């Protein structure tokens, strides 16, 4: 099996740490060398303690589910002899509270829209089945308890 690594770095700055008055800005560095500015979500902590333009963990979680589904879908489409020209998804994660009152990302809705080369496009039924198979095989979807709904938008055939 493979390992996937990320280094998270946060450092205390000005503020009253013991009273929660500190910046939540930090960085994520991945094994390929990419460093991404990260922060808590302004939906979780007051905006003065985070950076809304940075990636937050909840956004990254939703993006990882969407990205995994897309990668699995495109792989399976190529193996089925289809030709995908473009894939776009407007994924939305919803946070709710569990029975203990703890917030969690309880659902993620994927809304992929796929563009195919006309002579290499599936029927709507075949495309739905392909999304189902991609969801069943997605590594990330198989790793979380969050409900994931795939609701494709009409595809384009060129």
Image (cartoon, grey):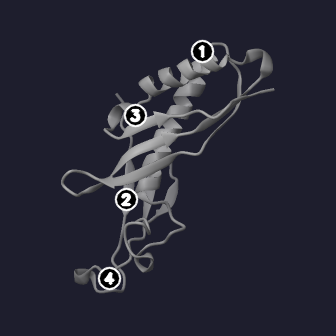
157 lies left or right of 22: right
Q: Quadrant of residue 158?
A: top right
Disc 3 marks which residue? 141
**Dot placed on the residue nearer the N-terminal end, 3 or 4:** 4
Camera-side residue of 135 and 14: 135
Give the spatial CA distance, label 3 vs label 4.
35 Å
Q: Position of residue 149 (x, y in %)?
A: 46, 35
140 lies left or right of 152: left
Give the spatial CA distance, label 3 vs label 1.
21 Å
Give the spatial CA distance, label 2 vs label 3.
23 Å
Q: Position of residue 19 (x, y in %)?
A: 24, 83
Disc 4 marks which residue? 21
Asked whether the viewer can see residue 31, the reply is no
Which mark's residue is nearer the viewer, 2 or 4? 4
Helix, strand or loop under label 3: helix
Q: Position of residue 63 (x, y in %)?
A: 50, 46
At 42% from the left edge and 37% from the top edge, which residue is drawn?
Answer: 148
Give the spatial CA distance, label 2 vs label 1.
37 Å
In the rendered structure, find residue 79 and report the number of the disc placed on it.
1
Is the C-beta separation of discs 3 and 4 under 8 Å? no
Helix, strand or loop under label 1: helix
**Dot placed on the residue nearer the N-terminal end, 2 or 3:** 2
Helix, strand or loop under label 2: strand
Is the C-beta separation of discs 4 and 1 under 8 Å? no
At 50% from the left edge and 59% from the top edge, which residue is drawn?
Answer: 36
Q: Quadrant of the N terminus?
A: top left
At 27% from the left edge and 81% from the top edge, which residue is drawn?
Answer: 17
Q: Position of residue 128 (x, y in %)?
A: 56, 22
Label 3, residues with CA under 10 Å away: few <14, some 14-19, many ≥20:
some
């Amino acid at each position: 099996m493979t390992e996937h690594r990320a280094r998270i770095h946060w450092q205390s700055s000005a503020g009253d740490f013991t009273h929660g008055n500190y910046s939540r800005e930090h960085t994520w560095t991945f094994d390929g060398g990419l460093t991404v500015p990260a922060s808590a979500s302004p939906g979780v902590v007051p905006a003065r303690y985070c950076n809304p333009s940075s990636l937050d963990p909840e956004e990254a979680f939703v993006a990882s589910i969407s990205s995994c589904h897309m990668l699995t879908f495109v792989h399976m489409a190529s193996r089925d002899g289809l030709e995908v020209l473009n894939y776009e998804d407007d994924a939305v994660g919803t946070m709710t509270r569990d029975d203990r009152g703890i917030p969690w990302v309880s659902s993620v809705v994927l809304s992929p829209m796929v563009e195919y080369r006309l002579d290499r496009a599936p029927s709507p039924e075949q495309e739905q089945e392909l999304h189902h198979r991609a969801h069943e095989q997605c590594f990330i979807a198989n790793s979380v308890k969050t409900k994931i709904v795939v609701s494709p938008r009409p595809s384009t055939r060129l």
